[in-house]
Image (tube, grey):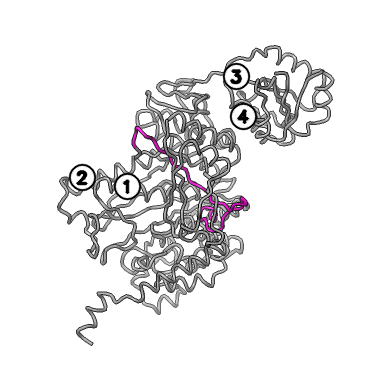
Amino acid sequence: MLEQQRDYVLRTVEERGVRLIRLWFTDVLGNLKSFAISPAELENALEDGMTFDGSSIDGFSRVQESDVLAVPDANTFVMLPWADQKAPEARVFCDIHNLDGSPFGGDPRQVLRRNLERAQKLGLDFLIAPDIEFFYFAPPEPGQAPRPLDEASFFDLTTTDVTGTLRKETIRTLETMSIPVEYSFHEDAPSQHEIDLRHTDALTMADSVMTFRLVVKEVAAAQGVHATFMPKPLEGVQGSGMHLHLSLFDNEGNAFYSADDAYNLSDTAKKFMAGLLFHASEITAITNQTVNSYKRLVPGFEAPVHVSWARNNRSGLIRVPVPKRANPLATRIEYRSPDPACNPYLAFSVILAAGLRGIEQGYELPAEADANLFEMGDDALQKLGIEQLPQSLSDALRVMESSSLVHDALGEHIFEWFLRNKRSEWRGYKTQVTPFELNRYLRSI
Amino acid sequence: MDLIAVFPEPPPPDLARTLDLAGYRWKAFASADEVAKAEPAEGWMGAIVCADADIENAWAVCRALRKKDVLQVPLLLLVTGAQLDELTLRDELFDDFCLLPFHPRELEARLRHLFAFTAVSPRPDLVDYGELVLNLETYQASVGGQPLDLTYMEYELLKFLVQNPGKVFTREILLSRVWGYDYYGGARTVDVHIRRLRAKLGEEHANLIQTVRSVGYRFGQSRWGS
C-alpha cells in the first residue's frame, strides 16, 4: 500500500511536471506551516522524511532537542489549483516524528492520530462535518474597525456580485482539492458567510479545515478582499462559529442510530453526548482558544452559553438535528461551541476523548433542555442543574489545567505548552486599558 | 530470468519440497517490499503466493508484482477452500490458482503450464470509457483530454470502477477491493470518495458513477441497458 502510494506520487510529479512540492504541517496553535522541496528530493522525503529545525515553530521543540522529521503522508498529495500552470505545484501533509522515528509529541496531527487509534480499537470510526462561518472585509487598516464589504465602496461590482463570485470560486477550488461542499450561504451578519463541508473521517477533516482556511483567504486576497475566521470581529452582530456534526460508525453502520428511540439516538450516542457535556468546560480552551472566542459565547447570538442539549434548540451546546426522512446514516449530533480559529486536530482530539470517556464509563445523559435558556434566570438554570461554559479564556484555562482527560488526550508536551502560551496571551490582554473602560470611567470617576 | 519469487518466508515445507524436486530455482520473501527490492534486473520468471496464513499481505505481494512493469510476471496463487470468495473481482492479480492443501503433481502441472508462455504477454496499460482515459502505467487520468487531479485513493477507486463497468458494487466490496484495510473512515469513506470523484469528473461526466439505491454504486451503463 505505502509503496504504491509513493509510486503514485512520484509518477504524478514526473508526468505533470511538478516543480515544487509544498510540505504542510500545523503548529500547536493551528497555524499552517509549509516548506517547499524540489522533485529531486521528493523520493528521499517520502522514504525517510525531511529533517528540519523545529525550534522555529510555535510549540514544537525546545532548543536542546530541536531537530524533527517531517514525513509526508502520500495519501494527502494533491496538485495546488492556484499555482502557475507553467510551473505546477503540489502539496502533501506531513506527520512530524522525532529523529528516532517515534511520533513527535508537539505535532497536533500525531495527537489526533493517537486519539483516532483509540477509537479504532473500540471498533469506532469518528466522522465529522463542520459548518464554517467567516467574514469578508475590506483589507484591514491598523487601528480601524473592520469594514464589511457592504459598506466598502471601492468595488466596481456590487457586493452581491463580489461575494457571490468569491464563494463560487472558493467552492470550485475546494472541490478540486478533494474537499466536498454541502451547502454555502450568506449568513445573518453583514459580509458573513457559511460553507458546510460534507462529512469525512476526522483526520481527513482536520486536514480539510486547514486547507479550507487557506483557500478562503487566498481566493479572497486575489480579489483584494480580506477573509477572516476571527470568532467575533464585529460587536453587536453574530460571531463566526464552527459547528461540528459528529457521528461514530462501527461495522454495523451508524453507531449513533437506534430505530427504537424517539430521537433515533442509540445508547452509544447518549453516552457520547453525556461525556461531551460532562467534560465540555474542560475542553473549551481548546475548541475556543482565543481571548476573542469568548466574546462570541454570549447570550442572544445563536452561540451556546450553557452546557445543555436539545433536539431543536439553538441555544444549547449540543443539538440533535432531525434527519430528513429518518435516514439512519444521517443521525448525528451537532456540537455548537467550537469556533473556526481553533486548531482542528486538537479540537477533534479532545471532543473525541470526552465522548469516548462517556461511552467507556457509561455516563448518563441529563434531561433535554428544550426551553430558550437565554430567557431563563440564573435560579431557574441552577434548579435544572445547567451550568455555563467558561466565560473567558482565563476561566477556560483554569478548568483545563485540572483536567486529566485533556492532559491525556493532548499529551504532556502540547498540554503544558498550550497552557503556558495561552496564559501569556491572557496576561497581554488583561494589562490593556480598553475603550470600554475609558468611555465608562474616565469622565464619571 | 529463472528465479521464482515465493511468499511467505518461510514457505510451507511441502511447497519448498515440491519446487526443489521439480528443479525450480526459487527464493522466499516475507513481504511485498522485500519482493520488490529483491527483483532481479531481468525480472522474475514467475511467482507463487501462498495466501492461507496472511491473505492481506498475500494480496499486497500480488499487487506489488503486478504494479511494477508493463510485462506480467506469471503468478500462481495458493488458497484454501474458505478463501475462494476472496478471489472475486481480483482476477487481474493472478493468472491461475490452486487449492490448499495442494497435490504436488497438480502443482507441478500448473506451474509447467503457466511458465510455458513465459514469452510474457503485455499488460494493457490504457483503460478507457467514453471520454475518460486512465493510463495505468503513469497513473494519470483524463477526461476529454483534460488531466484530472486525483488523490491516490480517488485514482484507485476510479480505476477499479472503469475496469468493471456496468456492475453494481456494494460499499463493503469497494472498501475491501480498493482500500484493503488501511483506512480511518469505514464504509462511509467510499461515499466520500465517490462524491469527490463526481465533483472532479465535472457536471457533464458526474453521472458516469451512479448511485444504486440501497445497494451501492455502478460505473457506466448497466449491461441490461437500464
Residue behind mark 1: A218
Depth check, mark 4 against mark 2: the one in front is 4
In the image, residue A96 lies in the stretch drawn in magenta? yes
Gap between marks 2 and 1, in whole Å? 18 Å
Q: Earlier in the sequence, mark 4 or mark 3?
A: 4
Relative image position of residue B31 (x, y in whole percent)? 69, 35
Q: Residue A336 occupies which quadrant of the picture?
A: bottom left
Q: Element under label 1?
A: helix
Residue tagged 4: B63
Q: Amino acid at mark 1?
A: Glu
Q: Is residue A254 visible?
A: no
- Left or right: residue A190 compared with residue B217: left
Q: Chain of mark 4?
A: B
Disc 1 and disc 4 in contact, CB within 8 angstroms: no
Amino acid at pointer 4: Arg
Q: Is residue A431 left or right of residue A161?
A: right
Q: Earlier in the sequence, mark 2 or mark 1?
A: 2
Q: CA distance from mark 4 to mark 3?
A: 13 Å
Q: Is residue A161 left or right of residue A417?
A: left
Secondary structure of the residue carrying tag 4 is helix
Whether residue A81 is situated above or below residue B89 in the rendered picture: below
Q: CA distance from mark 4 to mark 2?
A: 51 Å
Query: Which residue is painted at 70% across and 24% down in the image?
Result: B47
Number of labels in the image equals 4
Q: How far separated are the C-alphas under marks 1 and 4? A: 40 Å
Specify the label residue B71 is tagged with: 3
Residue B179 in the image: state x and y as whole percent: 57, 37
- Which residue lies under the disc numbered 2? A161
The reply to the same-chain question for discs 2 and 1 is yes
The stretch of residues the image draws in magenta is A84-112
